[in-house]
Image: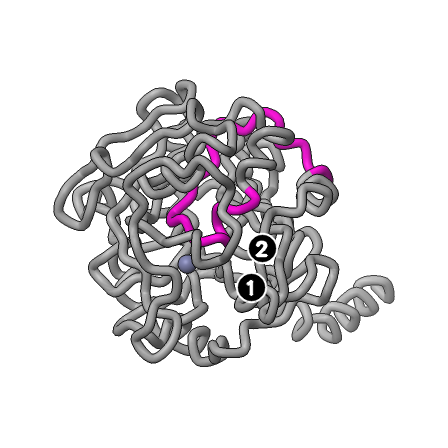
Amino acid sequence: MRRRARAALVAALLAPLLMSACLRPTGPGVSGLVDLSADGTAALRAVYLGSGGWILEHQGDVVLTGPLFTNPGLVTTGLLPIRSDTAIVDRYMGRYDVSSAVAILVGHAHYDHLMDVPRVAARHAPAARIVGSRTVANTLGTWSGMAGRIDLVDDSAGDQRTVGRWLWYGDRVRVMALRSHHAPHFDGYTLYRGTRDTPRTEEPAWATDWVDGETYAFLIDFMATEDSIAFRVYYQDAVAPPPSAFAPEALIAERPVDVAILVPATFDQVDWHPEALVENLRPRSVLLGHWEDFFSPMDAPTRSMRLTDIRHFERRLERVFDGEWWRPDRWTELRLPRG
Ligand SMILES: [Zn+2]
């Protein structure tokens, strides 16, 4: 009897703590390991690499999104030549075994999404296809050694009204590009704008050489069986004015998104981001990506971009989204359960 009374007292004392833990188990700002899966093997593993970089893994199927590790400083990027630092790429990408990755998704060709991709593809993900636009392909041109490894999406992409064509990687991963549009960086002005129509023969030397080109978001389906989806992931690497970057409504009606990776940086340059995407994708959970200051080295503490009021973005998200969402520091690993 006394033991039961003591247990009741402990439960009463812990109740607020347990309640708050139940209401929001973690986050929104998170770091380290966030394991929400009862059974790790069925989970979607999402590791945030900083900038646009993620490792997405389900039951051994691995998809990467274009990471940046070199992180040239702000002044360097503006005034001096920049190039991928292969030693830095190897140091950070080498922390993870991504050798089985089937694809590296690149939404646009700005340096912070594409510059480190050749080294990642050559050294760390030798089997992966690079999935992106004609400008992505032409920027990597002939100098990178990647010409034979690129899957163009310009002719297969979908949009709000049109179901695009799935690109299959093995029989358990499929990817659909979604027509998007790169939001301005500030005051309606977009840096490094343009398309590249012929293959470069030399490595780009300046940030201005990495023009954005056509911009895409992606739907990524990790399949349980040939026609049953285990996880549907949405990925964008740049804010877009709605309905750009929308997923086809017909697809979302069949199966809403499990995890939407949304970009806060520069959200205030367009109307109704993220509200419109939350309505379009009907996500079960949201991860914020490409939110932090990528002009600082990878081992610096993760802090948000100075130009973006991230708290404002988060308040806007919370007003329209009542699911779970997180803003991961670099290297955070989330394990999310199947719905
Ligand atoms: Zn960009």
Location of residue 87 with respect to 1 vertically, above or below: above
Circle 2 — which element?
loop
* Magenta segment includes 99: yes
Location of residue 223 with respect to 192 vertically, above or below: above
Location of residue 106 with respect to 152 vertically, above or below: below
Q: Nearer the viewer, residue 114 or 22?
A: 114
Q: Nearer the viewer, residue 214 or 222?
A: 214
Residue that protrudes farthest toward the left in the picture = 161
* Amino acid carrying mark 2 in the image: Ile
Q: Which residue is mark 1?
A: 77
Q: Nearer the viewer, residue 178 or 257?
A: 178
Residue 7 in the image: state x and y as whole percent.
79, 65
Residue 133's image quarter? top left
Residue 218's image quarter? top left
Residue 210 in the image: state x and y as whole percent.
43, 52
Q: Which residue lies at the image location 37% right of the left edge and 71% below the top edge? A: 267
Q: Which mark is residue 82?
A: 2
**What is the span of residues highlighted in magenta in the rendered image?**
94-116
Assess disc 2: are there few (<14), some (14-19) or many (≥20) residues with their C-alpha within 10 Å of its C-alpha. many
Residue 155 in the image: state x and y as whole percent.
21, 34
Asked whether the viewer can see residue 48, the reply is no
Marks 1,2: beta carbons within 8 A: yes
Assess disc 1: are there few (<14), some (14-19) or many (≥20) residues with their C-alpha within 10 Å of its C-alpha. some
Q: Which residue lies at the image location 63% right of the left edge and 51% below the top edge? A: 69
